[in-house]
Amino acid sequence: MNKFISFEGMDGAGKSTHLNWFAEQLKARGHEVIVTREPGGTPLGEQLREILLHQKMSMDTEALLMFAARAEHIAQVIKPALQAGKWVISDRYTDASFAYQGAGRGMDWQKLQQLEQWVHADLQPDLTLFFDVPVQVARQRLSNNVMLDKFEQEQGDFFERVRSGYHRRVKEQPQRYAVIDAAQSLAQVTAQLVSLIAKI
Ligand code: TYD
């Protein structure tokens, strides 16, 4: 049975590298796989991504635009692909709104739960890979990047809150997550993913 899988973690956790490898593994097993991302994934969503990653705005505006992009993404990409029997792998989904807008910016958790209910009460990922890494390690990895977006330019305490926001989500629905120790080397993280793929 095809599945909807999301990849999560703070900036610098290394999830994007592993996401592509993971998708190739599924394709090699004969599955049709769509790789997509949030914010983004549709022409409108990508326009919203530009705005979200580079313009300052109020906390509520940021959360609402994230969910607006998501509503479009679900309608245009995720649901049609799942209905056609394809696997969908999304680089981030709603957990990121709880971690960044909720824990990071301080938006009320219940308001985010209402948006989640409104936009996709019927569609949670079957599995979420959470790449967990200490903030210092993630910051170190990001320091090689020349161009940092609005979120990546935040300070360490913002990311401590983001990380704890992810942990809170994992505690709320532990059955949905595979927590990956992303502080390990590339080879060790890949080994964790190999055993995960064998299970799914
Ligand atoms: P990211 O996924 O890290 O892309 P890249 O690897 O190209 O930098 O960038 C997306 C950013 O958007 C990331 O910093 C987290 C943020 N974000 C939110 O704040 N809320 C959300 O709901 C989503 C989906 C992303």
Image (cartoon, helix red, strand yellow):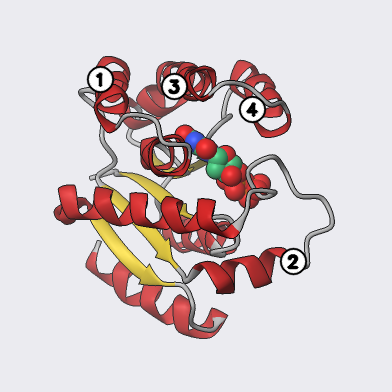
Given contact means CB atoms under 8 Å apart, are the residues at marks 4 and 1 in contact? no
- Residue at 47 percent across and 76 percent down: it is 190
Of the numbered discs 2 and 1, the one sitting upstream in the chain is 1
Image region (quadrant) for ligand 1: top right
Q: Position of residue 23 (x, y in %)?
A: 49, 56
Instruction: Answer few, some or many: residues within 10 Å of disc 1's Cα (few below 14, many 20 plus, some between 14 and 19).
Output: few
Dividing the image into 4 quarters, which one contains the N terminus?
top left
Name the residue that disc number 4 marks.
Answer: 52
Q: Position of residue 166 (x, y in %)?
A: 35, 52
| Amino acid type, label 3 | Phe
Any atom of ligand 1 within 8 Å of the CB at mark 3?
yes
- Helix, strand or loop at disc 3? helix
Q: Position of residue 79 (x, y in %)?
A: 36, 24
Q: Is residue 71 visible?
A: yes
- Helix, strand or loop at disc 2? loop
Of the numbered discs 3 and 1, the one sitting upstream in the chain is 3
How many angstroms separate mark 3 from mark 1 (CA)?
A: 11 Å
Name the residue that disc number 3 marks.
Answer: 67
| Amino acid type, label 2 | Ser
- Residue at 47 percent across and 71 percent down: it is 134
How many angstroms separate mark 4 from mark 2 (CA)?
A: 21 Å
Of the numbered discs 4 and 2, the one sitting upstream in the chain is 4
Name the residue that disc number 2 marks.
Answer: 143
How many angstroms separate mark 3 from mark 2 (CA)?
A: 29 Å
> In the rendered image, which quarter is residue 55 located in?
top right
Is the residue 9 above or below the residue 92 in the image? below
How many angstroms separate mark 2 from mark 1 (CA)?
A: 36 Å
| Amino acid type, label 1 | Gln
How many angstroms separate mark 4 from mark 1 (CA)?
A: 21 Å
